[in-house]
Image (tube, rainbow, N blue to C red):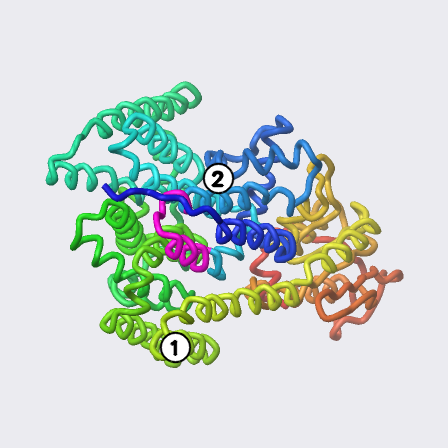
Amino acid sequence: MQKLTTPNYPLGLIAAWLFFIAFWYWGYDGITFSDDVSYLRLGYQFWHDIPFQENDLFNYRWGAYLLPGLITYLFGFNDHLAALPSLLSYLMTVVVIWRIIPEYLAKNVFVIFFCTSVYLLHFLPKVYPDSMLVFWTALIPASAIYRHRKPFMASLVMALAFFFGLCTKETIILLAPLPFLLFFVDLKYKRSIIFYRYFILFAAVFLLGYLGYYYAQYGDPFFRLKGIQTGHYISPYSFYDKGWKALAERLTFSPILTFIERTFWIWIVLAVPGLVRAFKHDKDLHLVFALSSVCLLFGFWFMTTSFAFYNPIHLNPRHLIILLPLLSVNIALEAKRWTNNFFWNRFGALWIAFGGIVALGLLDWKLAAFYFSFAAVLLLVPAKWKTPIMAVLLLFPVLASTAYQKELKNYDHFKSIFHKTLSSCEADAPLISHDFVVRSGEVLVGEYDRHLPLYSIQELTKKSATDGLPQKFTILIYSYYLHAYPEEGAFIKEVTAYADHFHFEKTEIYQDKWVNIIQYNLQEDLSTFQNHGEYVMDYSLDPAYFGDQKSFQIAW
């Protein structure tokens, strides 16, 4: 078995820690107005003993919201501070991998590639299960390295990693084949299998406890599995309802396009020498991480999210970040080979350049330039300079992307304007905004114990039908919707239609590059007026009109 050694000066480890901490602090660009809002709310509700209002898939991802919720419970609600568990997950991942990689050069190469993924860093200061799952994903193969030296402890750690990973997000199940594959490898080489006996025992105990909880709580040990099954719905990201052509695309070239567009392609290409060497030579460290990487890649590509129908998972970049620690290990272990070896050096340059050609076909010039630059460095730069120059190349899109996102959202400015505007509104003079802002209102305010005078235009319409028209209302338009939620462009048209129909006058209150605040006041004397040739004697609300939202949208 390969001897593990530890260098005297862990400069790469310290650098990784400092980089992650600095990025967590300065790279925060605000909440995503999406799933993180749900996890923040669930964490708050859990620690404040507030019952969950609906039976949602997220309710049972305890690992995603318990620690963030505990932090906001102890230190006060803060959406940035709540992401500390994500930072801790990344820091612990670096420590775990650093300890098991034997060569000092490989350790540093791992740090470079693990710390420079745009998407891994994007979710570092966010409350998402995927960022916390990074640690559990890395811990599973790391524990397998010790399965012969410390079988009892290694099996316990692996079982715990699977259990806590499952409680964080179901994606961890993609690594389930790993212990079985290692079992057959150890049988082939006639190695001890005591580890697997311990692992089966621990896994059975945790699984029975997991199923037993649902049986005791809901009377059905498979309540969670059934919840996942019934939680499927038709969306742009489902495949079971799209026909065989969409499914064929998803199972053939679509993942390749995703890997290229989201820059995971570099990690996959440079991991190939490590994967090939792992399957050709009996090196346990190489083999464990190679098998782990293949399990994840194969699972993301082909595994279904349903037992009732075939529906591969949508390859959201957020889902894919758990690949990065494993692929980075494969890259690091064979760094000398893909930097020096004639064949592998050109193999990497060729296939990375292929990513640039695809990017050109997608008319993404910046991405194409990035791939071609990387391929040129791999092909032309002397071996001793390749890794540091690649580090600079990988850091450039990270810093550029972070600066772009911060400028695009200007989250602190938006949040300040939102607070000031909302504080001047009341229940009978509410604030109206985009659906994604309304859904995030409690997180933006940092309070869950009072009803905010914040509504979507649809909610204002329904409220007007039952409580009468407000004397005034204010709308907040956040320009970030153009980037993140372009489908909400209808919001402005719907507000204008509502205001015109009920004769509100608008007054511009505030406008800048990111936020536009407009106040609408109900016209005073509306007992009689001329409207498109019709003489209106009485002004009243028609509940039937409000009940038909489609009529409202079509009419205006």
* In this picture, residue 273 sits left or right of residue 211: left
- Where on the picture, by quarter, is residue 382? bottom left
* In this picture, residue 348 sits left or right of residue 69: left
Q: Magenta-highlighted stretch: main secondary structure?
A: helix
The quadrant of the image that shows the C terminus is: bottom right
Amino acid type of disc 1?
Val
Can I make out residue 181 in this image?
yes
- Where on the picture, by quarter, is residue 154? top left
- Mark 2, residue position: 58
Q: Residue at x 69, y 39 (%)?
A: 77
In front of the other: 532 or 299: 299
Instruction: Check disc 2 and report its element: helix, strand or loop.
Output: helix
Q: Residue at x 71, y 42 (%)?
A: 446
Q: Residue at x 30, y 62 (%)?
A: 250
Can I make out residue 243 in this image?
no
- Mark 1, residue position: 381
In front of the other: 399 or 49: 399
The quadrant of the image that shows the N terminus is: top left
Q: Is residue 465 magenta?
A: no
Hey, which residue is sitting farthest front in the picture?
Answer: 8
Q: Eyeballing the image, is 510 above or below 319? A: below
